[in-house]
Amino acid sequence: MLFSQPEVASFLSDSFECAWESVRPVPRVTIDFGNGHTLERTLRGNIATYVCTSDGRTFDLIAGLVDGPEYISRLKQSLTLHDFISSGKPREASLEDSLARWHRATPPVVREELRRPEGNMNFSKNSIERPIERSLSPLFASTEASNGSVLDLNGSGLRFAASKIRVESPLVNGLRPALDESGLARDTLFAREEGYRLAHAFLATRVLQPPSEMYRDAYRELLHVDLDDPYLGLAPDVLGGEPGRH
Amino acid sequence: MLHRALFALPLLALASLSFQEPRRDIGKALVERRIENALTADGAGTSLASRKVAPGLVHWHPDFEAACAAARTSGKPVLLFQLLGRLDDELC
């Protein structure tokens, strides 16, 4: 976990006054093994970091996951920006303009290889969560069941429906550690290549707004999470039914 | 006199009933006691999701307003970390 890394924790505690808040409960899936043991993990979780003045106005934003060293590096830029804000050089009336210009960037270009995956937009979480979501999808299960054939494994006479294996294997594969390390590297790369520019463009039109006024838009536009959707995009793919809210 | 005594008898009976212990449903208690014990046993029936943990090693203020107040004294910027779920859940 990011904040359990000593270097990250000490940097944050030394350089910022820190607070955390939950924007809504996170969906959870529970696997009950039937012997008293259960396993739980989350789906579609995501994060955003706002850097604010002491009167609660946002001047910088990091959306999504990055690794520890990248997080520190990016936040050092925020500290530089804070030094500029605190220097007294920009008059208050022109501070918003100055910050908007700073954040304004060339229009982001989405490179095909960096296109965000379906489901949780973080590569690291998606590689774990997508197999679980697919296995929960009634459409996936019914398609597989209708195409299923029977396998005879090892000549032992044990016969398993291939469709059942194809449904359940993704679920088993999803029980790997919470973060796929290679996925986190991709998330960090995406942040450097596109994510930061997207966040800057977002902030350019919302500079110095408090987080409470922008967080829903930030989650929707930068993290592709509609916080007003009670199913967080899991309907209808996973839950079935018509697209949109239920 | 006899009439008064006869009249008082039901009243006395009612009064004695009200001071008696309510009748316990022993069969129901036998079932529920085991469930209660199971729920209060260490870790039993507790999912990872409900276990609380320290949210990392960072010094966190209790909320955004408290962080802003501290920042007005220290001169540091405020960092607000937002997430779905809770940072102090073991599963977050």
Image (cartoon, helix red, strand yellow):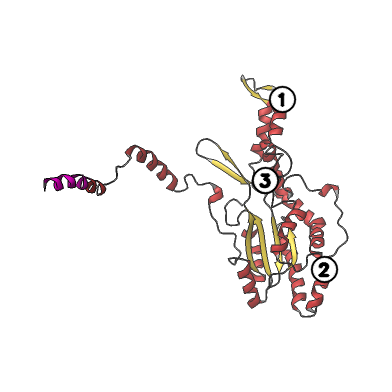
Q: Of residues B1 and A197, which is closer to you in this image?
A: B1
Q: Quadrant of residue A31?
A: top right
Q: Amino acid at mark 1?
A: Ser
Residue B5 falls within the magenta-colored stretch? yes
Q: Are marks 2 and 1 in contact (CB under 8 Å)?
A: no
Instruction: Please say if the residues under marks 2 and 3 sit with CB atoms less than 8 Å apart.
Output: no
Q: Earlier in the sequence, mark 2 or mark 3?
A: 2
| Subunit of label 3 | A
A130 or B65, which lies in front?
Answer: B65
**Is circle 2 on the same chain as circle 1?**
yes
Name the image quarter holding residue B68: bottom right
Span highlighted in magenta in the image: B2-13
**Tag 3: amino acid:** Tyr
Q: Secondary structure at mark 2?
A: helix
Mark seen at residue A146: 1
Q: Name the residue at 54% across, 55% down.
A: B52
Q: CA distance from mark 1 to mark 3?
A: 27 Å
Mark 2 vs mark 3: in front: 3
Which residue is disc 2 drawn over?
A: A100
Q: Is residue B57 left or right of residue A106?
A: left
Which element is circle 3 on? loop
The residue that label 3 is drawn on is: A231
Q: Main secondary structure of the magenta part?
A: helix
Name the amino acid type tagged 2: Ala
Task: Specify the subunit that label 2 lies on.
Answer: A
- Callout 1: few (<14), some (14-19), or many (20+) C-alpha neighbours within 10 Å? few
